[in-house]
Structures are given as C-alpha cells and as structure tokens.
Amino acid sequence: MQLKNYTKEFSYNWQLAAPVMLGMLGHTFVGFVDNVMVGQLGTAELAAVSLGNSFVFIAMSLGIGFSTAITPLIAEADAEKDFEKGKSSFKHGLFLCTMLGILLFLIVLFAKPLMYLMKQPVEVVELAIPYLDLVAFSLIPLIVFQGFKQFSDGLSLTRYPMYATILANIVNVVLNYLLIFGKFGFPEMGIVGAAYGTLVSRLVMVWYLWFLLKLKEKSKAYVMNLKFFVLNKLMLKKLLNLGAPSAMQMFFEVGIFTAAVWLSGILGKNPQAANQIALNLSSMTFMVATGLSVAAMIRVGNQKGLQNYINLRRIAFSIFLLGIILASGFAAMFFLLHNQFPKLYVDFDDAKNLMDNTEVVKIASKLLIVAAIFQISDSIQVIFLGALRGLQDVKIPTIITFISYWLIGFPVSWFLGKENVYGSFGIWLGLLAGLTTAAILLYIRFNYLTKRLILSKM
C-alpha cells in the first residue's frame, strides 16, 4: 500500500518529464549527429569536435545552470497565481541569460589559444579552432533559448521546448549533410560545416519556442511587451543568488567530464575519440535523468508555494524511484551492448584509418562498462539536485558538488588515468567516484531539509 503512494505519481511525473527528456535528448542528438557524421571523416576530426565542444560545454554548463533559477520561481508564482511575480521573474531571468550568453561567447573566443598549451595533438587543435569560432557564437541563442525553456517548464508547459528542439534537430541534420560532405552543390566544409549546422539550428530553436509561447493563452501575456531594460534590482539580486550557485553546480559536474576529454587528449587522439563516443552515449541517458530532475524541480516548487511539505517529500521520492528503475534499464543496455554501440561512430570500410578506428572502438567499449555502473549514481544525484533547486536550496548543494567532483572524482581520474596505470579506463573510474559521492551527499541533504520542514509545520 505504501509503495502505491509513490507509484501513483509515475504517470503525471512522466507526462511532465518526458517532453523535457526529449528536448534535452534533442540537444545531445545534435552532438550525436555531428559525431557520427564527422566520424566518417576520420579520428582526428572526431577528436577535434570533442576538443572544441569541451570548451563550449564548460561555458554552456554555466549558462544552462544559471537559467535553472527561473523554473522554481515561475513554478512557485504559478502555484500562488501571482502573474506579476511570474512575469518579473521571467523578464529578469531572460535579460540575465542574454547578457551571460554574450559574455560566455567572448570568454570562449579569447580562450582558444589555451588549446596549444594543453598538450593536445597539434593536428586536432588546428582542426578544432575554426570549428570552435562558430559553435562559440551559437552559445548566445542557446542560452537565450534556455531562458525561454526554463520559463516554459516552470508553467508546466514542457512540450513546447521539445517541439523547438525537434525542429532544430531536423535543421541540423539537413545542414550537416549538405555542408560537411558538400552535397547538392553546397561547398564541402568538413567539420566547419557541422558548426554552421549547429549555429543555424540554435537560432531557429529560439525563434520557434518564442513563436509557440506567443500563441499559447497561458504564456502569451508573459512573453509579450517585456520592457527588457526596465529592471528591478531586488529581482536581479534574487535571480543571481539562486542562479550563480546553480551555474557552479553544473559547472563542477560538466567540468570533470571536460577534464576527462583533456586527460584523454594527453593519451593521444584515439583515446580522445573513444572518450568522446562514450561521453556522447552516456550523456544521452543522462538527459533522461535530467528530465526527471526538471519534473522534481517543478513539482517541489509547486508544493513549496502551497507549503505542503509532506506531499512535497512523497512526490520527490516517487520521481527518485522512477529514476532508479529507468537508470537500471540503461545500465543493463550499456553493459550488454558495450561492444556494439561504439561501432556506430566509425567507418570500418575506411582502409586508411582501420587500425585507428579499431583501437577507438576497443577503448570506448571498456569505458561503456564504467558508464553502465554509474547510470544509477548519475540519476540519483541529478534528481535530488533538481528537488533541492525546487526548494530554492542552492548554496550547500554547490559545496557538495565541488567536494564530490573536484576533491574526490578528479584526483582519482588524474592518478588512475595515466598511461602507465589504467589510461582512459582510470579516467572514467574517477567520474564514477565523483558521481557516487554526489548522489549520497545530495540524498542526505534533501532528506534532512524535508524532515525539518515537515517538523516546522507541526
């Protein structure tokens, strides 16, 4: 009977989370398409996309992490039926996302020379730099899109960002095909063609989501007549206080995965290409957990607005239970198919690169065994992080993520990831250690806070 209290929430949680999952998978699918198409050009090109994207992912983590501050504020205002509070939260959040997008683009642009100082293969760096110029610029529309997306999620309109992401993927696939390989009279641009596809698809994505929200009665009044530069210092401060720690949480997690890219690059172009394959596959399953994390943030935010803390805790644990079930399925899939999945990314008919491609698949298949094990840890930590954001508790979780990934995970990756120890496999053991520590500590934090809130109402 007690289990039924949790499982009865599965249907509604899934309705909320599924569009977010598909939308987030859409972001990752852009990377998957780029990797599969670029992988046909050779391992150096695949490693170059990996290196270029590692810079963008760090910047993107700050932008996406910051934008998550909008969702709990909108969810709380929606539960309270306070339109003015909701519109103010959205407008100020969108303004800060736009400014942050421009700032992050400039930082990535000026950080390019670091590639030459990072002991990465020279041929990989030379391919990565022109690719990075365009993908860095695409950060601006991507983070503006995140502002709209988090607002839309806060109103429980989770389908609209999904529709925009699906359209963006179609645009990206078509442009990649035309520009990477030079089809139908278009110039053959290699990996720069993939960068153009990413940039154009992200511009389309922002426009289409705004267009959809403008048509919907529930969101229309929020997104029209914004008076973008008429700002309130208190609301800006509130968003910054919520958004900055959230940005750092995502930065610390994405940072350790990016460090894995760089550590792999020190081992050579083939370990780096293998790391990119395993990272791309595991990030697709992570987006499912992220969808549940957003559902936790929305529903916890709603219950916080209603001050119903017993229900809040029950709903959060029902999402956690659903996450464990799905993560166990992904773990089994990765374990059973760890030899098959990497073969999607390379061309075994390419005689010139056959030795390189064989080595890449061999390394990537081992990394997927570690990825199978950390599916459950990854799911737990991101769901409880979302639930804590819904409670607007962001400072202690930021410290937890720093300790987990940088005081525990990274040293393990660094020591075990050397060529004379475990190499790429050792790097991923460090990721496993960091994610597992984060999962345990974030669960303890949520459990403590919710029990305290329930006692305070008695």
Image (cartoon, helix red, strand yellow):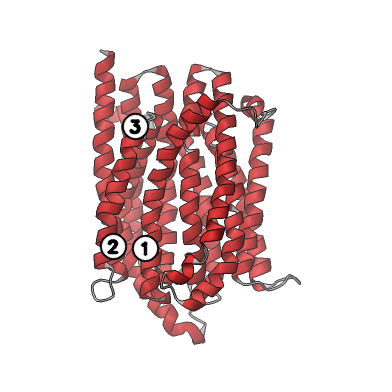
Three-letter code for the amino acid on which mark 3 is drawn: Ala
Residue 298 versus residue 250 in the image, above or below: above
Determine crowd level at label 3: few under 14, some 14-19, many 20+ residues with C-alpha closer than 10 A: many
Q: CA distance from mark 3 to mark 2?
A: 32 Å
Question: Upstream in the sequence, badge 3 or badge 2?
Answer: 3
In what element is the residue under mark 1? helix
Q: Name the residue type under label 1.
A: Ala
The Cα–Cα distance between marks 3 and 1, rounded to whole angstroms, is: 31 Å
Instruction: Tell me the quarter of the picture where residue 289 sits.
Output: top left
3D distance between C-alphas at marks 2 and 1: 8 Å
- The residue sitting at 31% across, 62% down in the picture is 428
Locate residue 113, reporting x and y percent: 51, 67
Label count reads: 3
Residue located at (48% from left, 83% from top): 353
Q: Which numbered marker is on residue 260?
A: 1
> Does residue 278 appear anywhere in the picture?
yes
Q: Nearer the viewer, residue 63 or 46?
A: 63
Q: Is residue 243 above or below residue 110?
A: above
* Residue at horizontal 57 percent and vertical 31 percent from the top: 92
Q: At numbered mark 2, what does the secondary structure look like: helix, strand or loop? A: helix
Decide: is 374 above or below 222.
below
Instruction: State the residue at coordinates (30%, 64%).
Output: 427
Which amino acid, by three-letter code, is at mark 2?
Answer: Ser
Mark 3 / mark 1, whichever is N-terminal: 1
Q: Quadrant of the C terminus?
A: top left
Whether label 2 touches label 1, CB < 8 Å: yes
Label 2 sits on residue: 413
Which dot marks residue 316? Answer: 3
